[in-house]
Image (spheres, rainbow, N blue to C red):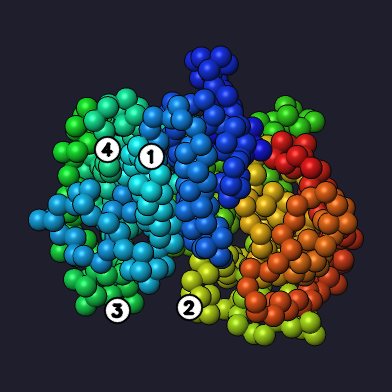
Amino acid sequence: MYVTDDPRKTEHLLSLDGAKERLHLFKAGLLDEGAFDAIVDGCEGVFHAASPVLLSANDPQAEIIDPAAKGTLNVLKSCVKVPSIKRVVVTSSIASVALNGKPLSSDVVVDETWFSDPVYCEQQKFWYMVSKTLAEEAAWKFAKENRIDLVTLHPALVIGPLLQPTINLSVKPILNLITGAQTLPNEVYTFVDVRDVAYSHVQAFDVPSARGRYCLVQCVAHLIDALKILKELYPSLNLPEKIRVPFYLMGASELLPYMVNASRMICEDDNHLLPIYQVSKEKAKSLGVNFIPFEVILKDTVESIKKKDDPKKTEHLLSLDGAKERLHLFKANLLDEGAFDALVDGCEGVFHTASPILLSVNDPQAELIDPAVKGTLNVLKSCLKVASIKRVVVTSSFASVAANGKPLTPDVVVDETWFSDVAYCEQQKLWYIVSKTLAEEAAWKFANENRIDLVTLHPGLVIGPLLQPTMNLSVEPILKLITGEGRQTFPNTVYGFVDVRDVAYSHVQAFEVPSANGRYCLVERVAHLIEALKILKELYPSLNLPEKCEDDKPLSPIYQVSKEKAKSLGVNFIPLEVSLKDTVESLKEKGFVNV
């Protein structure tokens, strides 16, 4: 089994019955040929399930395609060396079956004879689908050439009860439905229960006659079908009632006449719904699979999500000195007006930091923009009702400052007078930046109209020691540099770095310094990743760091960000060198890396 350095990604496996005696965890790099030799030695069966599930990437070849295709081949190359291995079962995906540009309508039946077209998928920039298709092609070619008994399984969107403590990508469409989205994406999914997928893997190995490919799809359904079932199961849920036609629909010719300004269009009838199609269950049934009904899957998914109010997201806060006496945790929905009334009642200061940080979304309006904008306004509306509140500090982002299309070169100094351009960001599909910019605009408009003393802070990429036990998005670029993750290159990317301790101190000062006002950029230094690599190489000479940029273009230029206003709060920024060292040391302490 391939595992990460993060023990929290495996501890739920180690707690299973019998795991202590029968489960052995190994670490292997998908891109390292021979890395699986010791793992499969002596085995009778091998199940290869590891593949990156990323729907967007800076470098699709390095981040998605190579790990999937080369990783699969490396597993098979290790298997071919072991005579005792009777069969290899590879977890592919329905993504490698049905995406070929053919029309999908209610009279179409997709089965195991269908294959996705990598050229079509590349044109549509469906990189995950490209990776699964190429990986499967490579697997079958190698298996036939080397007489490996191979079976590939092609599950749909896998939902059902969660074994792991965190929410995974495939459950998110259901999570989005039940957590306050106001509109419903016009999307069709193929669904299957995780228990059926697990059982199919066992049967694919145990049934002697198993061979070839198996589609694992309980049903094909529009999200509106899921919504109707959820409404019956949970009448009190605040579920979306309108359908949003997403901006990114491709190949849906029947919808094109309706897609003028489609990102804003709301369809209130069923005439414009994407059509469903069929997927054959016959071959899967030959394995003994009796698919769990869709209604049961949805109910078990929701019940499992309800149990995942993850204490790991708060227990590190509750363990802080004085937390027992002075820290009170409340639960509130950003989209529910009035939800923060009880929370801020009696306060003198309010710090609003909650905003979804998602760089890849299906529905930017519902998943990013509404929670950011409406959430910020709902906090401010609650604050307006409390006379004792002296000041509100909102954590915005440097994302709302510098993304406006202006050239950023070494002689340019960005300061608090800069604003990101929403139209430019929408054109570039920079949805997170759109959300932060619109949220800030809405906050200042509301504050000015209602005479709220507001301060907004605009941190860059926040690194430094981790307080929480889990990995956050802003530290991931550093983690990827030092763990490699099979990458031999580094992105041609510039970041504005800041230490988390400076960000925390700035929040305190933004409230306590009477003269604090307006916006504050919080960036210690703008640096290319190559500079971060040089610092890390000096600090940790033994690290196997990438040495080549991912493209042959000139390095993206750095620029400057003014520190003057931040210094007026008393902030003396921690140098990047110290932040990087403390980041790595924290990653070591938390078990993410071994350096």
Which tag, 3 or 4, sits closer to the chain's start? 4
| Disc number placed over residue 260 in the picture, else none | 3
Tell me the CA gap for discs 4 and 2. 47 Å
Q: Nearer the viewer, mark 3 or mark 4?
A: 4
Find residue 192 and report its horizontal and vertical position in percent.
29, 39
At label 4, counting other C-alpha atoms closer than 10 Å, the crowd grade (few under 14, some 14-19, many 20 or more) is some
Judging depth in this view, the residue of 145 and 34 nearest the camera is: 145
- Quadrant in the picture for residue 245: bottom left
Residue at the (13%, 56%) spot, across then down: 108
Depicted 426 relative to depicted 9: above or below:
below
Mark 2 lies on a secondary structure that is: helix
Between discs 3 and 1, the one toward the N terminus: 1
Mark 4 vs mark 2: in front: 4
Q: Earlier in the sequence, mark 2 or mark 1?
A: 1
Query: 411 left or right of 125?
Result: right
Q: Dot 3: what SS? A: loop
Residue in the picture at 21% in, 43% down: 219
Can the viewer see residue 194? no
Q: Label 2, on which residue?
A: 427
Q: Amino acid at mark 3?
A: Val
- Disc 4 or 1, which lies upstream in sequence? 1
Task: For mark 4, give the secondary structure.
Answer: loop
In space, the residues marked 3 and 1 are separated at their CA atoms by 52 Å
Residue linked to disc 4: 211
Say what amino acid the circle numbered 1 marks: Ile
